[in-house]
Image (cartoon, helix red, strand yellow):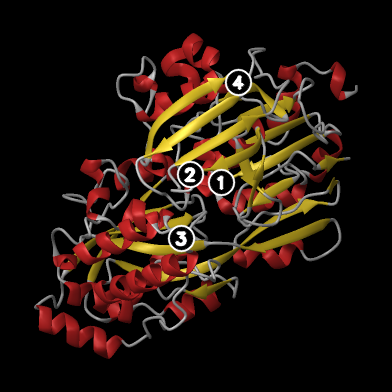
């Protein structure tokens, strides 16, 4: 039976029940419908509302349903037009005027226009907007400089900023800038996150909790048609199960392949894809209370952990040791003069003794798997052993990804001393501004879950985001990196090269430096 004759329910049954966990027989491959791409995801999505989510796991679905005014040019982090065809910037850098693409409709049939753009940003930024309370807006920081959005006419919109803001266009290309249908938000309210409507090459079909999210080709798409009839995103949280499903043909693609499993896909029948990007894997340290409130203990943790061994033995050489909070993929802003903390357990012991923290007990939050978290349980166990070797008593608490975020994002106070974390970012401003500033403490709406605070870092970050000269921005970021490395609010672990594997039935797939999963051009035979 051809795909077009299958009902949505039948398609989903073919994609999920046949390949239920534990059903790994090779003949299942023949039952995968042609033209239907089955993707093994690392976790269940939290929501399908771009204003309400933060994880790349969710973004990988969203970028196929939604579009923004601009996007990242394929293969780069450079910005190019998408729903806007052109834009102008005022001489003082505080006003951006966009000309919108005509003839575009949302998946619910309502028109895309300037009022729709205004609705999206007003909903995110204005607390008195009628639909502001339909969900959290955790990355509204991206657009904190936006003072007013004006629909000049049907196809022209202007953003007025309160100051020059260098990352503005890049942030518009990030998933937080994806545009939703105002009519769909009005229709579904707080349930919009499970009833999405964008303008992208795919439209939402079905979400069966803990089984699959299905998106279908959008027949009314304004651009080039999608190369597949549908994509099914299956949450398979256990990495070993994802690998087994991929080997047996239960899925056509998986992202974030465990490094130890890569060799299993080197033969015929599979293609391994790699792409460098701006990724940093780190440990958040509780700088507000407990042993990690002392900088010497935080530095000791950086010396105590054998990051080279983690990179080479746990990650199989798929990453480099991180030197600080900024990934080297941002070459223009990266401080190449900084060397990573060396592995020096004797120095770690001396610092602990100086701080009176010998034998301190620590609680360490570890996730079972999540966006960019590499091999988190194995890494967490290795870290626990290294810290034990210098006299620290570390208790690991392990959580499923979304539960983990619910514990970590609100802050570690009263709960833990350390937590794993990884970010894939779009601009050197993003991670430090959202996770290292004093004003980004969780009770102020940010992601500084360890409560780090340094007024000089705050000042440098504020200056960098309003600097219009890239050279000036670079110098400010490099100064920030040096201070943060010295203060050690995190253990700086690794910068990872992302990977994915596809079956030989999949063509035209490439990973993006943005870590987003663009599937419009992919063909599944």
Label 4 vs label 1: CA separation?
Answer: 35 Å
Frontmost residue, 481 versus 266: 481
| 354 over 245 or under it: above or below | below
Percent coordinates x, y for residue 352 in the rendering:
17, 80
Looking at marks 1 and 2 on the same chain, the residue that comes earlier in the sequence is marked by 1
Looking at marks 4 and 1 on the same chain, the residue that comes earlier in the sequence is marked by 1
Q: Residue at x 76, y 44 (%)?
A: 252
Looking at marks 1 and 3 on the same chain, the residue that comes earlier in the sequence is marked by 1
Query: Which structural element holds mark 1?
Result: loop
| Picture disc at residue 42 | 1
In the image, taking residue 139 as reference, residue 107 lies left or right, namely right
Percent coordinates x, y for residue 106 in the rendering:
65, 19
Please state which of the two labelled residues, at mark 1 or mark 2, is closer to the viewer.
2
Query: Which structural element holds mark 2?
Result: loop
Looking at marks 3 and 2 on the same chain, the residue that comes earlier in the sequence is marked by 2
Task: Residue under label 3, please give it.
Answer: 428
Q: Residue at x 30, y 58 (%)?
A: 436
Q: Are marks 4 and 1 in contact (CB under 8 Å)?
A: no
Frontmost residue, 471 versus 82: 471
| 29 over 398 or under it: above or below | above
| 201 over 491 or under it: above or below | above
Label 4 vs label 3: CA separation?
Answer: 31 Å
Task: Residue under label 4, please give it.
Answer: 113
Frontmost residue, 433 versus 297: 433
Is residue 454 visible in the rendered structure shown here? no
Please state which of the two labelled residues, at mark 4 or mark 1, is closer to the viewer.
4
Please state which of the two labelled residues, at mark 3 or mark 2, is closer to the viewer.
3
| Picture disc at residue 55 | 2
Q: Residues within 10 Å of mark 4 (few under 14, many from 20)?
A: many
Looking at marks 4 and 3 on the same chain, the residue that comes earlier in the sequence is marked by 4
């Amino acid at each position: 039976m051809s795909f077009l004759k299958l009902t949505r329910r039948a398609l989903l049954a073919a994609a999920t029940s046949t390949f239920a966990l534990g059903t790994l027989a090779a003949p299942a491959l023949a039952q995968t419908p042609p033209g239907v791409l089955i993707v093994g995801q690392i976790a269940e999505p939290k929501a399908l509302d771009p204003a309400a989510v933060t994880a790349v796991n969710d973004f990988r679905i969203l970028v196929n349903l939604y579009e923004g005014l601009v996007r990242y040019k394929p293969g780069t982090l450079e910005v190019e037009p998408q729903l806007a065809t052109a834009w102008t910037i005022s001489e003082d850098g505080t006003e951006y005027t966009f000309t919108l693409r005509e003839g575009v409709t949302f998946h619910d049939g309502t028109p895309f226009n300037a009022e729709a753009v205004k609705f999206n940003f007003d909903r995110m930024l204005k607390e008195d907007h009628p639909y502001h309370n339909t969900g959290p807006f955790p990355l509204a920081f991206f657009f904190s400089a936006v003072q007013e959005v004006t629909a000049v006419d049907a196809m022209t919109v202007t953003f007025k900023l309160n100051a020059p803001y260098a990352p503005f266009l890049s942030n518009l290309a990030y998933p937080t800038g994806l545009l939703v249908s105002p009519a769909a938000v009005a229709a579904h309210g707080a349930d919009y996150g499970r009833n999405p409507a964008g303008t992208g090459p795919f439209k939402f079909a079905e979400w069966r909790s803990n089984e699959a999210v299905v998106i279908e080709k959008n027949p009314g798409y304004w651009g080039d048609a999608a190369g597949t009839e549908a994509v099914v995103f299956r949450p398979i949280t256990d990495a070993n199960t994802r690998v087994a499903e991929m080997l047996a043909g239960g899925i056509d693609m998986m992202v974030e392949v465990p490094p130890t499993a890569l060799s299993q896909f080197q033969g015929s029948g599979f293609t391994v894809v790699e792409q460098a990007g701006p990724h940093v894997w780190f440990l958040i340290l509780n700088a507000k209370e407990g042993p990690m409130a002392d900088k010497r203990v935080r530095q000791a943790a950086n010396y105590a952990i054998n990051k080279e061994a983690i990179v080479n033995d746990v990650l199989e050489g798929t990453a480099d040791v991180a030197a600080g909070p900024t990934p080297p993929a941002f070459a223009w802003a990266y401080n190449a003069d900084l060397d990573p903390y060396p592995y020096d357990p004797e120095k770690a012991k001396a610092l602990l003794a100086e701080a009176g923290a010998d034998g301190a007990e620590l609680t360490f939050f570890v996730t079972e798997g999540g966006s960019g978290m590499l091999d988190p349980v194995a890494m967490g166990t290795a870290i626990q052993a290294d810290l034990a070797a210098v006299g620290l008593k570390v208790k690991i608490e392990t959580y499923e990804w979304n539960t983990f975020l619910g514990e970590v994002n609100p802050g570690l106070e009263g709960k833990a001393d350390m937590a794993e974390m990884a970010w894939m970012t779009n601009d050197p401003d993003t991670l430090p501004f959202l996770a290292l500033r004093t004003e980004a403490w969780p009770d102020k709406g940010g992601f500084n879950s360890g409560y780090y605070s340094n007024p000089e870092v705050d000042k440098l970050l504020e200056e960098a985001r309003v600097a219009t000269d890239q050279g000036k921005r670079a110098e400010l970021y490099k100064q920030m990196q040096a201070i943060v490395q010295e203060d050690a609010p995190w253990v700086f672990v690794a910068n990872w090269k992302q990977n994915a594997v596809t079956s030989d039935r999949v063509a035209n797939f490439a990973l993006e430096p943005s870590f987003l999963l663009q599937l419009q051009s992919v063909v599944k035979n």
